[in-house]
Image: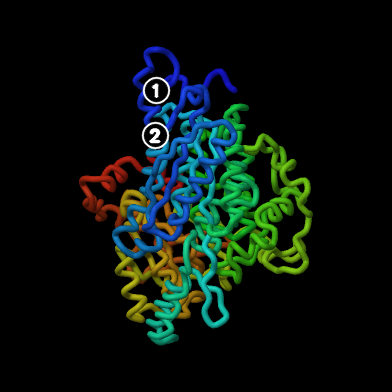
Amino acid sequence: MSKNLRSQKITQGLQRSPNRALLRAVGFKDADFTKPIVGIASAHSTITPCNMGIAPLATEAEAGIRAAGGMPQLFGTITVSDGISMGTEGMKYSLVSRDVIADSIETACNAQSMDGVLAIGGCDKNMPGAMIAMARMNIPAIFVYGGTIKPGHLNGQDLTLVSSFEAVGQYSAGRIDEAMLYAVERNACPGAGSCGGMFTANTMSAAFEAMGMSLMYSSTMSTIDLEKAENTALAGKVLVEAIRKQILPRDIITRKSIENAISVVMAVGGSTNAVLHFLAIAHTAEVPFTIDDFETIRERVPVLCDLKPSGRYVATDLHAAGGMPQVMKMLLTHGLLHGDCLTITGDTIAERLKDIPEAPPANQDVIRPWSNPIYAQGHLAILKGNLATEGAVAKITGVKKPQMTGTARVFESEEDCLAAILARKISAGDILVIRYEGPKGGPGMREMLAPTSAIIGAGLGDTVGLITDGRFSGGTYGMVVGHIAPEAFVGGTIALVQEGDKITIDAPGRSLHLHVSETELEQRRVTWKPPVPRYTRGVLAKYARLVSTSSLGAVTD
């Protein structure tokens, strides 16, 4: 055992007798005061199916840690249900929760001098929140994904939460009746687990597996399957060994391992939120990484997996086809993965993948063979131009026409835009502009799943564009551009767009351009006034004062 355990500060010496007295009350015996104290940061909650299955997993983690000679100490952290808060003011707290989670884990671990931490999370911000805390503290750590939900079923079709959002648009456009709307609602989410497509939760869990901070195969397991419980207990044992060896997060979270994670995000067709979160993780780990690096990786990595929201399959299908190790082995074989990166097990990525076949199984089509990818290049494009001098993120999977010029329809909030879509006031050729939804302006950078799903449901996905300084759900697809920076609230060009202006979204050319002269823009800028902050007290006000631009990851430290 390491001679420099952090927990010695609270367990050793006559002066720590009161500390030990309290530890005895929670189950410590004499022999336990020389064991590593291992925190279990549990995001269990019954406010969302994503997290309602975590409590039993925390028990498994405790058992694994004890079996390996550690002393587990369970504590809670929060979660926000993105899906339940979507389309409301409550969604402004979603990105904020990433930092609250990070702060709470750091607070508990450092206050109690823990020797390591195992974090278990489900909904979207649990993963980056935990990883930011791990990178900050740099104590031995492992992330355990709470697991994915099983798909819902209706009329022979797999359903996810996004199916229900799209059904709202279908109903408003007269494409389905009310009975079908409610049938989709009743069947979309059958039980515990995070949303089943390659949305943000599954994207980030897959990326953490590729980065080496989670165990292989863990990111695509179902919450309710036995293997998830067994994997969680194993993670506890692996973490205790990492404490003995002092394998630290910043040994694992490096420039090369982040490149591995982003390569996997591209290969599986993952969420735009990965851009925001990995910029924040890199910042915290003090790894040089910029928004332009995503474009470099995109150009060389194909999309290999046919996954929802724009594809056919869900995460459990990917698991059955070989999971992330199969995707990673294909990337490694073709020189697109750094095999020498360390993992939490102490082995390298290449060592963990040595027994994985170089090609996917022939009896499935979830993972395409290298010779027949879904797309020859990645799907998350970084666009720049006079509308986004710092950058913006476009998700171009499922887009038939990745370039369009259209007429600006300007909305000062997500709600106003959704109302116009549902009232059938949007036409082919329109480019919807939703602004003042950025990190500071929202504040909190809401996800625009409701309007983007309504566009798809209305049958306008190939003919209507949408740009915003807010974010998109991992369930979003279509001609959409988010994370526009600088945001409207700080005077970015998106604040100057007027109804009827012409805008070009050019994904292949990586350009986002407002067809207004510089002279005219300067005149508009003179008359523009910063809006009054929407919140002056509480967590949203504090967040707005601290948060950076989205092009730097919307970090608060």
Residue located farthest toward the top when viewing the structure as drawn = 14
Of labels 1 and 2, the one closer to you:
1
Identify the residue shown where x is 51% and y is 23%: 31
Q: Tell me where residue 363 sits by quadrant.
A: bottom right
Q: Residues within 10 Å of mark 2 (few under 14, many from 20)?
A: some
Secondary structure under tag 1 reads: helix
- Labels 1 and 2: the sequence-earlier one: 1
Q: Decide: is 523 above or below 130.
A: below
In which quadrant of the rendered view does residue 74 lie? top left
- Find residue 457 and report its horizontal and vertical position in percent: 45, 77
Q: Quadrant of residue 73?
A: top left
Q: Nearer the viewer, residue 273 or 24?
A: 24
**Residue at x 43% of width, y 69% of height:** 452
Q: Nearer the viewer, residue 507 or 547?
A: 547
Tell me the quadrant of the picture where the C terminus can be found. top left
| Residue at x-position 47% and y-position 72% | 188
Which quarter shows the N terminus?
top right
Mark 2 = which residue? 108
Q: Residue at x 44, y 28 (%)?
A: 28
Distance from label 1 to label 2 (Cα)?
17 Å
Confirm whether residue 246 shows in the render: yes
**Three-letter amino acid code at the position of disc 2:** Ala
Residue hosting label 1: 20
Identified by mark 1, the residue type is Arg
Residue 427 coordinates in the image, percent (x, y):
41, 79
Please tell me the numbered disc located at residue 282: none
Question: Image check: 458 left or right of 366?
Answer: left
Spot occupied by residue 395 in the image (x, y as percentages of width and height): 53, 62
Badge 2 marks a residue whose secondary structure is helix
